[in-house]
Image (tube, rainbow, N blue to C red):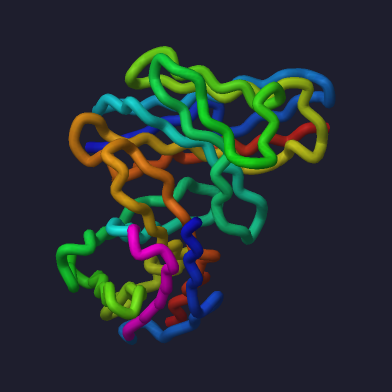
Amino acid sequence: GAVVSQHPSRVICKSGTSVKIECRSLDFQATTMFWYRQFPKQSLMLMATSNEGSKATYEQGVEKDKFLINHASLTLSTLTVTSAHPEDSSFYICSASPSPGQIQTQYFGPGTRLLVL
Amino acid sequence: GENVEQHPSTLSVQEGDSAVIKCTYSDSASNYFPWYKQELGKGPQLIIDIRSNVGEKKDQRIAVTLNKTAKHFSLHITETQPEDSAVYFCAASPFTGTASKLTFGTGTRLQVTL
């Protein structure tokens, strides 16, 4: 149980285009999902907290207009990288917390590798 | 805010030996401490977690210990196998009544050699 999927697993796009990444909790409901970014050989950096039915909460330094988050249902959150640039190339990972239940536990998706040319 | 330090950054052990990774945290409000294993190109996988009302938890070859007074917790892997090779992250979070943020350590790259 507690499976989180992400789609796509890998995406290459041209500079200036937008990319949407989906995060789904497959066998549990998640009121809250989290979006992280990870650079090579570094730890996970929290970008934003996504709450179903309300606006996402962004971490300091993360542009909310560039990284659009939508959490339209209890099993789906999406991250859209708008007007992507090469510096946005990274590994994006989502996590989901089961609710009700293990609200502190976060289960992670497999990640999406974004390459902006 | 919370700050989590993790040591060592790299660890090499021979197959069959034990591996220990240590973390310290700063916020006394933290009460949940998970450990994640991340293989190359994959998302982190929860391998064990502990809450502040217990001092130790075991799951087969993996154990975690927590010292609330000293604000440190450790991951112990016994009888290591090559498939244990990965990056391990510790994390900490407070109880807020809702899903709360995790603060991660910087990671430990474990290499199990034959």
Q: Is residue B47 above or below residue A22?
A: below
Quarter-of-image position of residue A89: top right
> Residue at position x 31%, y 43% from top?
B96
Q: Position of residue A48 (x, y in %)?
A: 54, 35
Quarter-of-image position of residue B100: top left
Q: Position of residue A77 (x, y in %)?
A: 46, 22
Q: Position of residue B41 (x, y in %)?
A: 55, 49
Q: Is residue A106 above or below residue B67?
A: above
- The tally of labels here is 0
> Residue at position x 18%, y 36% from top?
A101
> Residue at position x 72%, y 29% from top?
A12
Please tell me which residue lies in front, B25 or B80.
Answer: B25
Quadrant housing the C terminus of chain A: top right
Question: With B33 as the anchor, is B2 left or right in this view?
Answer: right
**Residue B20 lies in magenta, yes or no?**
yes
Q: Position of residue B44 (x, y in %)?
A: 43, 50
**Residue A10 lies in magenta, yes or no?**
no
Range of the magenta residues? B18-29
Please tell me which residue lies in front, B59 or A53.
Answer: A53
Q: Is residue A20 above or below residue A96?
A: above
Q: Is residue A41 above or below residue A52?
A: below
> Residue at position x 50%, y 63% from top?
B3
Question: With A87 as the anchor, is B58 left or right in this view?
Answer: left
Quadrant housing the N terminus of chain A: top left
Question: With B18 as the anchor, is B24 left or right in this view?
Answer: right
